[in-house]
Amino acid sequence: MYVCLCNGVTDNQIKQSIHEGSMTMKALYQDTNLGNQCGKCCQCAKQILNNELLKISETQYQAA
Ligand code: FES
């Protein structure tokens, strides 16, 4: 699914970037170029970031 229509960034690209180390919105912006035009995608991208960080933390908690 496209999250950022202005730059053609998908949710899978965002998730991949997060799993490769983009842990902040600033890092996501720099890695994917999302949000640098109209900005309408930022809220959705933030939700994806929060969900993925939560999943990562739960996985690490269960592994410990
Ligand atoms: S939809 Fe992402 S900058 Fe416009």
Image: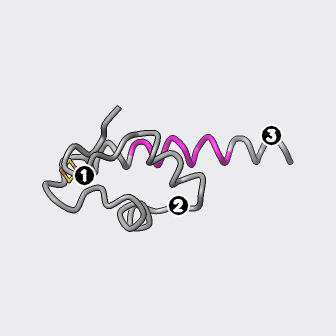
- Residue 46 x, y percent position in the rendering: 37, 49
Answer with mark 1 or mark 3, whichever residue precedes in sequence: 1
Magenta region includes residue 49: yes
Image quadrant assignment for residue 62:
top right
Alpha carbon distance from label 2 to label 1:
20 Å
Question: What colour scheme governs how the chains and residues are painted in the rendered image of this protein?
Answer: one colour
Q: Mark 2 points at which residue?
A: 23
User: Residue type at mark 2?
Assistant: Met
Q: Mark 3 points at which residue?
A: 62
Asked whether mark 3 lies closer than 8 Å to ligand 1, one says: no
Determine the main secondary structure of the stretch shown in magenta: helix
Q: Are marks 1 and 3 in contact (CB under 8 Å)?
A: no
Alpha carbon distance from label 1 to label 3:
36 Å
> Regarding mark 2 in the picture, which secondary structure is present there?
loop
Tell me what residue is drawn at x 53 percent, y 48 percent: 16
Tell me what residue is drawn at x 53 percent, y 53 percent: 18
